[in-house]
Image: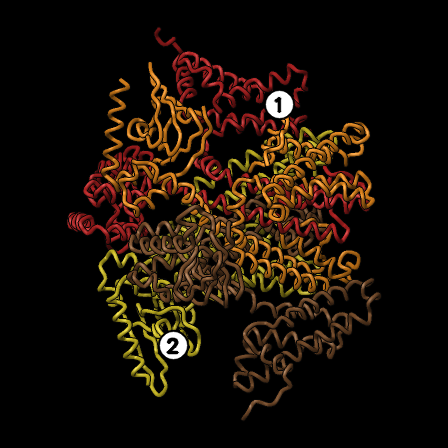
Chain colours: A red, B orange, C brown, D yellow
Amino acid sequence: MSEPPYSSVFAQFVTATTGRNMTKAAYVAVVAGVVLMVLLSIDSAYSALYGWLDALLLACLVFFIFEWVVRLRQAVRTQRVAGYLLSIRGFVDGAGAIAIPLALLFGATPKTAWLLGVLWLLKVIPGIPGLRQLRRVLVQESGPLFSVLVIFLMVLFLASVVVYFLERDVQPGTFGSIPAALWWAVATLTTTGYGDVVPITPLGRIVAAFVMICGLGVFGLWTGILATGFAAETRRDNFLKTWESVSKVPFFAALGPAAIADVTHMLRTMDLPARTTIIRKGQAGDCMYFIADGEVEVDLPGKKVKLGDGAFFGEMALLGNNLRSANITTTQVSKLLVLDLVDFRVLMARHPDLSETIDAEAKRRELENK
Amino acid sequence: MSEPPYSSVFAQFVTATTGRNMTKAAYVAVVAGVVLMVLLSIDSAYSALYGWLDALLLACLVFFIFEWVVRLRQAVRTQRVAGYLLSIRGFVDGAGAIAIPLALLFGATPKTAWLLGVLWLLKVIPGIPGLRQLRRVLVQESGPLFSVLVIFLMVLFLASVVVYFLERDVQPGTFGSIPAALWWAVATLTTTGYGDVVPITPLGRIVAAFVMICGLGVFGLWTGILATGFAAETRRDNFLKTWESVSKVPFFAALGPAAIADVTHMLRTMDLPARTTIIRKGQAGDCMYFIADGEVEVDLPGKKVKLGDGAFFGEMALLGNNLRSANITTTQVSKLLVLDLVDFRVLMARHPDLSETIDAEAKRRELENK
Amino acid sequence: MSEPPYSSVFAQFVTATTGRNMTKAAYVAVVAGVVLMVLLSIDSAYSALYGWLDALLLACLVFFIFEWVVRLRQAVRTQRVAGYLLSIRGFVDGAGAIAIPLALLFGATPKTAWLLGVLWLLKVIPGIPGLRQLRRVLVQESGPLFSVLVIFLMVLFLASVVVYFLERDVQPGTFGSIPAALWWAVATLTTTGYGDVVPITPLGRIVAAFVMICGLGVFGLWTGILATGFAAETRRDNFLKTWESVSKVPFFAALGPAAIADVTHMLRTMDLPARTTIIRKGQAGDCMYFIADGEVEVDLPGKKVKLGDGAFFGEMALLGNNLRSANITTTQVSKLLVLDLVDFRVLMARHPDLSETIDAEAKRRELENK
Amino acid sequence: MSEPPYSSVFAQFVTATTGRNMTKAAYVAVVAGVVLMVLLSIDSAYSALYGWLDALLLACLVFFIFEWVVRLRQAVRTQRVAGYLLSIRGFVDGAGAIAIPLALLFGATPKTAWLLGVLWLLKVIPGIPGLRQLRRVLVQESGPLFSVLVIFLMVLFLASVVVYFLERDVQPGTFGSIPAALWWAVATLTTTGYGDVVPITPLGRIVAAFVMICGLGVFGLWTGILATGFAAETRRDNFLKTWESVSKVPFFAALGPAAIADVTHMLRTMDLPARTTIIRKGQAGDCMYFIADGEVEVDLPGKKVKLGDGAFFGEMALLGNNLRSANITTTQVSKLLVLDLVDFRVLMARHPDLSETIDAEAKRRELENK
């Protein structure tokens, strides 16, 4: 029932591997694996580095197989095997581990089998920041995006058939069938325009011109839809990240709940590691900060002042001459709320009491610094 | 005066055909017809499958002719023949049914006549979701879009004449006339760039560079216009879909009419078929639901609770630990209103009474579940 | 001092010509002139139609010279010669009238001189609807657009020099000088990609890939700026067009000035010629109308009712079953204010008194119609 | 301790050089240097102008070295050497000054060394208006932009490997390695489409079509993100520029702080040099002006009236017949606040007292003018 005894390094590796984020080692292995796989395809590099390439690729593969086994075992222990195997992560881990051995088993040449190393790239997916946000936009706007896709396909097919009809006798080599004409149409409608297949009859060219202009239109619609969705999503994402923290800051607690919802739209959350300089003396300042969680150190001449949860700083540059008057650094991992100059002014204008609190504190600090 | 007696299967077909939506059979026939038509144009496929291709295409054609006749008859019975024939749907049905026979009649070869099968694709148009929305955007923004089109054409013609003048002596083969130069210009201004016709004189290239940059500008304007129109239309569309349902939910009835208009902007309508799982136990929850119409079943340990019109659910994850505590499934076709976490918080902040109602219900449920 | 006696037809022509808008004759002449000019450049068409082409082009030229003379004379009479000559319109008229004769005078061949007929296209500019709006967007956003242009040029030059350095020894024919490399760079950065000049060294291709991705970025910035500007401008334009009319409608006069400003944002102006059908019986209705100026006729069964300035109609479909209950047609040139269903609901929710007025009128009308 | 005695011209140059903005001389030198560098690469121009080109380029280089030395010395005097050298400006100045001598030192041919003159272009960077704004957008949206970039790279690699696998046997010359396939993929995914490397197998073309459509999607996401960020940034930038000035205008002082924040969003700042005509008699007027700082002269018939800080003008066209009634010119460098017609109406509607003040002043002025 107790944890099996691992050697310390190995235990650390296992812990890291089964954590939420990809380990640094895994990132290195992904990049190395893909670079090696690319090198393998270059004949001159292959013959020059033969032994090394194969050995290193094998090392990458072993690493990923090992990682997969560790995670599988962890899943077995927590009784979530099915959940793991069916999740994106489980699928990607599995594919990266067994695709190459399977390909070799089924008789692929080693050079071809290693190409499957490109699947390792997919391991990066769960770690992409903002991917969830992008996915939400695509889901929310899937209706209009699908409509545009259908229109796209309709234009594609209609144009292909017309141009096939017009060009097939003149250019039987390139427009000899509708699939060939579709190849032309897709390169034209996306405004890629390879130029390997080009209509030469006057009517064919008029249709082609129309297709290109449709391409611009499809592009525009697509972008318009995504821009609309993205604007909404950005606002939502920021609100959610900030909401929890705002209510923890006593400064805002005085406001009623309705005002807090407004304030939340004005703030931005910032997660900082320890020993990060937030403010540098002498720089121009265009925002102030509230500490939602963590601690910062103000480097005043002659002494160092620490500010903890709920404190604010950076307001003096906004009230005074616009320049920061001291270095401020985090002492631990901290979560800050950033209030931009614009929103600072709007907030102060709407809530005179907050304005007074900040003014008083700024004056007190100025006196103290002298 | 009575309905003519049909055999049962046939009657079902007629009913389905004259309904609002395209039948599944029709979708299958459209896709099959177009694929067959594409195959017909590939010589090797044609000779390999000769008999089958023709037979299947004929079957598709017969299906569409039959569909058209059924609809025409229905139109005759409801005395809307003119309306049907002049509607997009009537036109598309008619074209799909008689274009190929007509082409054969006028002496086209069968292989050419079957190309008209691409018109069957148009039957999909009335079924595209969100097409009405796209059309409204194009209509609303038609003024600016038309302006951009005129500018586009003007740049096209001016550039063509200038480049024709500059290149005609150097490349008489490719820039031998203004239409040839127009062909170059349209491929350049849309940034397609086939490369089959390219200016080679220094001045011609400078004009070409200018045309390409104009192309970016036209693109940008076009997209900007569409993005603006789309944002407005999305908001409008959502409001209209949601408005009717909101007033049916007693929870919101307490709010005054002005507040209901605000709330409507926050909600999204979701139409679900029966037996659809809305919430899965253990997943992270970021919205709550109101039942505008229909019924859901909450799968609690030991018992199943049904919630009907006007009830709400999913609020516990928003108030508590963020994870769904039970599976919830529709028992019949249902219309739900979705309130996103962000809007939930804003709404609760603005309307403390609603907040209390929800809190009380959530507490009651939590006790019940224990 | 009196007007010189013109023959009637001629007088009409002069009046039309000196009016604000381009005459229909001028539009025809522009299109005809440009088409003829294009035909002239096609050798086969030229030899087939020799006499006619020249004669018709000459007719167009005479028309434009005559138009210019009439306008110049009008300008002399109203003592605005300088203003006219320096305006866009005066410049365009002058260029269209004297460019071709001047070219012939300076020894150009007729075939070359007629190419200047493309300048006639510019006469369309003052008539483009929404051009003023586009221009305002470009002016308002000129700062950021200029920045992007500078970045564009900087990337262009840096990439050209680097690729010239990398490719000049391998491809002396195509990358033999920086201008040649610039030609490649502009086709790449705009993502046109002719393919006539393509880097082949590995380093050159990496730079090229970077340039293409920059191209996407420049594109995105450009579009983002224009979209932002366009959204603001559209709102402004609509407000200005609507404001004057709103205050003329007694229905809105009851609202205070602040509420009128809100309402103005909700309405859209629509200018209609006489005898235009606005509403067709049986169609779905999604907006109501206020008559700012003009008159409409409601085609009720058995009688025709006329509605004049300040009246409203179309509200019954919004309140009831969503279908229009009568045909409504303008009897004279009219200016209507359109209130969309969404805004109708918001407005009714915010102003219960307006809501009552409309309800009462709708009920009165329904009774009357029975 | 005193300033070292310079000759007057030299002192002026030094002052100008160490100022915030680039001197006009430097702009001229940058443009001249780059043009000369381009000419140098054209063999025919080089041989025709040999001596001159080299001499002028040398002059440019000397100028930039001299500029750098002056700035370095200034930095030494103000004890900011490290700050200067590490700033973008210091880096750019240094690179422009020493890159070419260094290249010559390391044995590059003069023709190659002069290519580094393209670095002079970078000196323009700190002077680009709105660059700070663009940078803020990129920083704010860096998360989503980075996500899109990762997706872009992932599609790039996956598509390359697949197409390499499909095409390597058919086209060993162009798809002989993965880097070669990557080159194809990047040209396709950015929709550049050179056409030098094109898949020819049916499967390869299907993958290519998919890549092109992904290209549109990446483009759309990119633009959507930038458009969203840009809209927010534009609003912020305008607010900050305007805020300071608004509080200086007594007209707005009557408003409470919350209203001032609203008004700030409506105003736009305009910085004008002396002797600039702001309003021209007889033109259509669509905005009014407040003088935040400076002085203007109203050119009335028979007399000239001066208006100073805090005064407003241009309101008569907004209240009356829409045409400006007098020329108005700045007499000194002035900062104006512009209130657009739309916002003027909204503001007047919301604040009847401001409306009265403006009406009264307009009436007084009209009487005076008569």
Q: Residues within 10 Å of mark 2 (few under 14, many from 20)?
A: many
Left or right placement of residue A277 versus residue C45 in this view: left
**Residue A294, disc:** none
Which residue lies at the image location 51% right of the left edge and 39% below the top edge?
A: A143
Q: Amino acid at mark 1?
A: Trp
Give left or right: position of D163 versus D137.
right
Q: Disc 2 marks which amino acid?
A: Thr
State the image coordinates of residue B314 (x, y, percent, origin top left). 34, 28
Judge whether residue A168 can be spotted in this image.
Answer: yes
User: Disc 2 marks which residue?
Assistant: D329
Residue situated in front as seen by the camera: D179 or D71: D179
Tally of marks: 2
Q: Chain of mark 1?
A: A
Residue that sits furthest to the front in the current view: B1
Position of residue D264 relative to residue C114, above or below, is above
Q: In which quadrant will I find the N terminus of chain A?
A: top left
Separation of residues labelled 2 and 1 (CA atoms): 75 Å
Left or right, D88 with respect to B162, comes to left
**CB under 8 Å between callouts 2 and 1?**
no
- Residue A164: x %, y % from top left: 75, 43
- Report if residue D90 is visible in the image: no
Left or right, residue C63 beside residue B54: left
Circle 1 residue:
A114
Q: How dense is the environment of label 1, judged by Cα within 10 Å: few (below 14), some, or many (20 and up)?
A: many
In percent of width and height, residue B259 lies at 30, 45
Of helix, strand and loop, which one carries label 2?
strand
Q: Quadrant of residue C77?
A: bottom right
Discs 2 and 1 share one subunit: no
